[in-house]
């Protein structure tokens, strides 16, 4: 089978993502030193407790309700949600946004569902390309709990912004049932998140977060749905019981994502500010990407991929944040594997291990590879397609991270987080 044919076969495995339009489908004209449209500054003091990476995932509709289930990584007071229309081409109006703790299914813990406001108002309209933070919600939000954020969208149109592959069941409805704690009107299930792309809290003083830029492995493909067994979830549990100051984890994985070129989602270079650097409390960016660049047609060279890593590191350093890089895991047996791509992977990993690209390194290649064939994933960790780890592999990845590397402190020249809770408009 030709590499082009293998590429088509591999894309079919995630064809729903492309068919639903979760990527931009565009190739950038070159490196973009300025942030992409819709990239916000962080909203005030706080720490991100949950996040996902947005893209366009279909067509928006009026009169829809969304009850979105997300898991907190760090607890604290002053909960805020970030709603995004970053990929929309028309304004979106949100009313009656609520947040509460899930009991089971679409049902909430009685008395926990509370209304969020936006500059004191129950309604906010977010322009095309914009992002908005809610006002802080009084009270404490615990770590490691499933939070239900309920949105009602009376007016929307054009492109729908969200995250296609949530690996988590959420719920949709017709009409405004956001204040209801019972599940009666929340019958339609969905495996995506809509409009919501971050939740923040104010934890104890000195607490920080890590943002993980990745592809479908980080997004959790082949982990168990609704069990929070993506490797960043296991990492969050480790951090929660550790003595480190970093407690928050933002999962910025997108299935099929690349470092260099747009495709399913904007490239890591083009989305790093919105999906990582702008999130409140982030001290460190963890970068685990590159396999999709290598197995593309044409595939990236080792020199090109390393140059992309360096550009991303420079951008993080310019905002005072450190970058932990991970080696690219083995994928022999996947449809797009070939010896040429394997040679690139080996060269890239050797350069990463040399230690002059990133501030710290986690060697996922050594953790996941087979002892009998280092080009393949270990059978005990293989989710079945030879590229994506299963739950056991996800946990092994998280266990391999040196937690001290995630708390590198603030670098000189860090730009302070911007205050404000209003609509953040796209930069032009």
Image (cartoon, grey):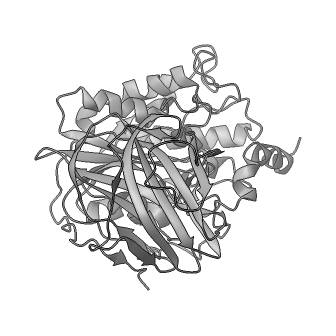
Is 233 drawn above or below residue 185 in the view shown?
above
Name the residue at 17% across, 66% down.
413
Q: Is residue 325 visible?
A: yes
- Relative side of 228 to 241, left or right: right
Name the residue at 58% across, 25% down.
390
Q: Residue furthest right?
A: 1
Task: Pinpoint residue 339: horizontal percent, then vertical percent.
Answer: 72, 37
Q: Is residue 313 visible?
A: no
- Relative side of 337 to 427, left or right: right
- Relative side of 393 to 11, left or right: left
Quadrant where the C terminus sits is: bottom left
Name the residue at 21% across, 65% down.
44
Task: Pinpoint residue 145: horizontal percent, then vertical percent.
Answer: 36, 35
- Relative side of 107 to 19, left or right: left
Is 74 drawn above or below residue 375 in the view shown?
below
Name the residue at 40% across, 37% down.
353
Q: Along the line of sight, which residue is nearer the eye, 420 or 427?
A: 420
């Amino acid at each position: 089978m030709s590499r082009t044919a293998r590429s088509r076969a591999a894309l079919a495995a995630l064809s729903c993502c492309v068919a639903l339009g979760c990527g931009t489908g565009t190739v950038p004209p070159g490196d973009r030193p300025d942030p992409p449209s819709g990239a916000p500054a962080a909203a005030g003091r706080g720490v991100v407790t949950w996040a996902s990476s947005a893209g366009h995932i279909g067509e928006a509709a009026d009169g829809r309700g969304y009850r979105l289930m997300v898991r907190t990584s760090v607890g604290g007071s002053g909960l805020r949600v970030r709603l995004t229309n970053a990929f929309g081409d028309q304004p979106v109006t949100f009313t009656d946004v609520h947040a509460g703790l899930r009991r089971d299914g679409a049902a909430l813990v009685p008395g926990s569902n509370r209304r969020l406001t936006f500059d004191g108002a129950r309604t906010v309209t977010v322009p095309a390309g914009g992002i908005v933070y809610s006002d802080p919600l009084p009270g404490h939000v615990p770590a490691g709990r499933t939070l239900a954020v309920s949105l009602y969208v009376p007016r929307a149109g054009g492109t729908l912004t969200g995250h296609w592959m949530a690996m988590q069941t959420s719920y949709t409805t017709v009409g405004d049932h956001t204040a209801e704690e019972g599940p009666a009107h929340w019958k339609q299930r969905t495996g995506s998140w809509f409009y919501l792309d971050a939740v923040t809290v104010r934890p104890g003083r000195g607490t920080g977060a890590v943002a993980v830029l990745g592809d479908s492995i980080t997004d959790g493909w082949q982990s168990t749905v609704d069990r929070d067994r993506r490797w960043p979830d296991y990492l969050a549990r480790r951090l929660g019981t550790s003595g480190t100051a970093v407690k928050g984890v933002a999962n910025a994985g997108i299935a099929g994502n690349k470092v260099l070129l747009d495709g399913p989602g904007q490239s890591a270079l083009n989305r790093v500010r919105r999906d990582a650097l702008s999130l409140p409390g982030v001290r460190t960016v963890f970068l685990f990407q590159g396999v999709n660049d290598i197995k593309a047609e044409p595939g990236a060279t080792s020199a090109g991929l390393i140059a992309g890593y360096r550009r991303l590191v420079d951008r993080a350093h310019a905002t005072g944040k450190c970058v932990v890089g991970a080696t690219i895991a083995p994928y022999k047996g996947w449809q797009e594997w070939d010896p040429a791509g394997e040679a690139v992977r080996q060269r890239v990993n050797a350069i990463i291990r040399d230690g002059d690209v990133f501030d710290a390194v986690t060697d996922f290649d050594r953790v996941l590879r087979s002892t009998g064939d280092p080009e393949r994933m270990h059978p005990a960790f293989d989710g079945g397609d030879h590229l994506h780890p299963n739950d056991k592999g996800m946990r092994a990845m998280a266990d391999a991270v040196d937690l001290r590397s995630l708390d590198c402190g603030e670098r000189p020249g860090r730009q302070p987080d911007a205050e404000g809770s209003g609509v953040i408009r796209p930069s032009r």
